[in-house]
């Protein structure tokens, strides 16, 4: 089982890479780094919370684990 701090760090590093990619995608569609960054930041915030909750829920599932 991962500690909460480890889950937070995993989420932070994953979402940082996602922030960069989403900003570039947002810029491609809008032509604005500001608009693309806003879209990306919203995605990062929602994604971080979703990832944390997803990991906590899966941590309770015993299926597929080996002793």
Image (cartoon, helix red, strand yellow):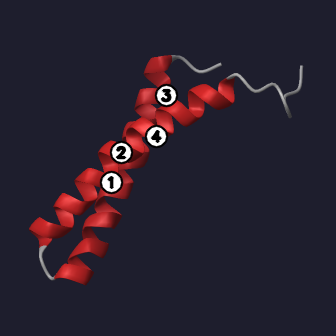
Give whichever of 46, 15 is nearer the camera.
Answer: 46
Give me the C-alpha separation between circle 1 and circle 2: 5 Å
Residues packed near mark 3 inside 10 Å, few (<14), some (14 to 19) or many (20 plus): some
Q: Which residue is mark 1?
A: 43
Residues packed near mark 2 inside 10 Å, few (<14), some (14 to 19) or many (20 plus): few
Q: Which residue is mark 2?
A: 46
Tag shown at residue 50: 4
Residue at image position (10%, 66%) is: 34
Residue at image position (46%, 40%) is: 50
Give me the C-alpha separation between circle 1 and circle 3: 18 Å
Q: Are marks 4 and 2 in contact (CB under 8 Å)?
A: yes
First in sequence: mark 4 vs mark 3: 3
Q: Are marks 1 and 2 in contact (CB under 8 Å)?
A: yes
Tag shown at residue 7: 3
State which mark lies toward you, 2 or 3. 2
How far from the left and from the top, in percent, is residue 37? 18, 62
State which mark lies toward you, 4 or 3. 4
Q: Is 41 above or below relative to 37?
A: above
How far from the left and from the top, in percent, is residue 35? 14, 68
Left or right of residue 32, residue 11 in this image = right
Give me the C-alpha separation between circle 1 and circle 4: 10 Å
Left or right of residue 38, residue 59 in this image = right
Name the image quarter holding residue 33.
bottom left
Q: Are marks 2 and 3 in contact (CB under 8 Å)?
A: no
């Amino acid at each position: 089982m991962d500690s909460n701090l480890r889950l937070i760090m995993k989420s932070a590093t994953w979402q940082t890479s996602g922030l960069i990619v989403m900003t570039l995608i947002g810029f491609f569609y809008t032509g604005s780094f500001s608009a693309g960054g806003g879209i990306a930041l919203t995605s990062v915030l929602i994604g971080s919370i979703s990832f944390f909750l997803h990991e906590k829920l899966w941590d309770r599932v015993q299926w597929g684990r080996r002793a």
